[in-house]
Image (spheres, rainbow, N blue to C red):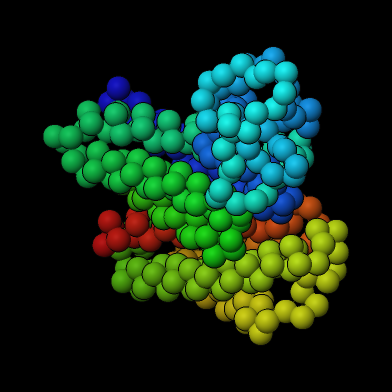
Amino acid sequence: MKKLYKPFLVASLILVYLVIAAGSVVRMTGSGMGCPDWPKCFGYLIPPTERAQLDWKPNHRYQNGQVIIVSESLRVAAKDFISKNNYQESNWEPYTKHDYALFNPTHTWIEFINRLLGALAGLATLLLFVSALGRLKSDPIAPIGAFLVVLGMGFQGWLGKTVVDSNLLPFKITIHMAMALLIVLLLVYLLSRDQKIQTQLLQLKQFKAMALIALLLSLIQIGMGTQVRQYVDEQMHRLNLMQASTWLSDAPFLFYIHRSFSLIVFIIHAYWGYLFYKNNTIPLVFKGIIVLIGLEIFTGIWMYYFDFPFSSQPLHLVLAALLFGAQSFLLFVIKRKS
């Protein structure tokens, strides 16, 4: 099991990024309430595919927790029972966490896939922790870090429940995203301890300072981006999912700061790249960071000037998460070499 530590670590990181990507698609398509309960979906492990499955049926076996829609509201089976010829209110309890009672099969399955990926990511991190126990004597930091990741995934699952229960309050979605980035940070730290970048340049203090400044600037940019995203979410719900051209028609001043701040991030990294070039070596991970920054700026322009094409928001968010992971990785490697 000890030899599987690295594969499980890489698999965990990939799956967490897939969850972030799926979550961004859920948010863009307005599918967050596709499953109005948690952790099941309308009370089922495998969600329904058509509205008729959520209608009350006579002489039908219902299990505790299964959901039906009655008079545009959710009802939850209070116990296991077989329904009679007539609907009996005593067998059902109202769903009290929210009053959302719509069924859209596309939204339901998008949200279900998001949750399925989350469950797979949770399983991968659990296996990572088990494999890390084999390093307890030689590398005690590995099992401690892996255990923190497992705790983080558990807390993230609970946050997902609160997001659904709140009927997608924007600030709770932002906290959910911030927790995902914290999990990425922990996994990237564990990965950086197993990687070797052969360059003496990374021992220079100026590169350590540049790595820290670059990461802090990106965190500020991500923080502003989450606030802009909250505003866009509110516009999406207040106006219409199809009226994307109006979402930023009266944008807050923070949006313009966020847009211009990307140039500062780019300039700092361009200068850092110049220092690498001046010393005749550029680490591969830094080349990836430059590419990610360019793509991040491109998708930001794409969203604003082309009225939020379908894939633009998920790509923008995933690229930001990848950039955060790559910058954190390089900072951790530099700190180790220093």
Tell which residue pokes out farthest to the bottom in this image: 253
Q: Which percent across, then down, holds residue 7?
A: 41, 30
Name the foreground residue: 198 vs 298: 298
Q: Which percent across, then down, holds residue 11?
A: 47, 34
Total marks in image: 0
Quarter of the figure that contains the N terminus: top left
Tell which residue pokes out farthest to the left in this image: 137
Q: Can residue 249 be seen in this view?
A: yes
Residue 119 vertical position relative to residue 193 in the rendered view, above or below: above
Residue shown at the point (62%, 81%) measured from the top left: 254
Name the foreground residue: 157 vs 187: 157
Q: Which percent across, then down, holds residue 164?
A: 57, 49
Residue shown at the point (75%, 42%) measured from the top left: 71
Choose top left, top right, bottom left or bottom right for residue 139.
top left
Residue 120 vertical position relative to residue 147 in the rendered view, above or below: above
Name the foreground residue: 11 vs 45: 45
Q: Can residue 142 be seen in this view?
A: no
Choose top left, top right, bottom left or bottom right for residue 168.
bottom right
Residue shown at the point (62%, 67%) measured from the top left: 230
Quarter of the figure that contains the C terminus: bottom left
Name the foreground residue: 195 vs 171: 171
Residue shown at the point (50%, 52%) measured from the top left: 162
Choose top left, top right, bottom left or bottom right for residue 248.
bottom right
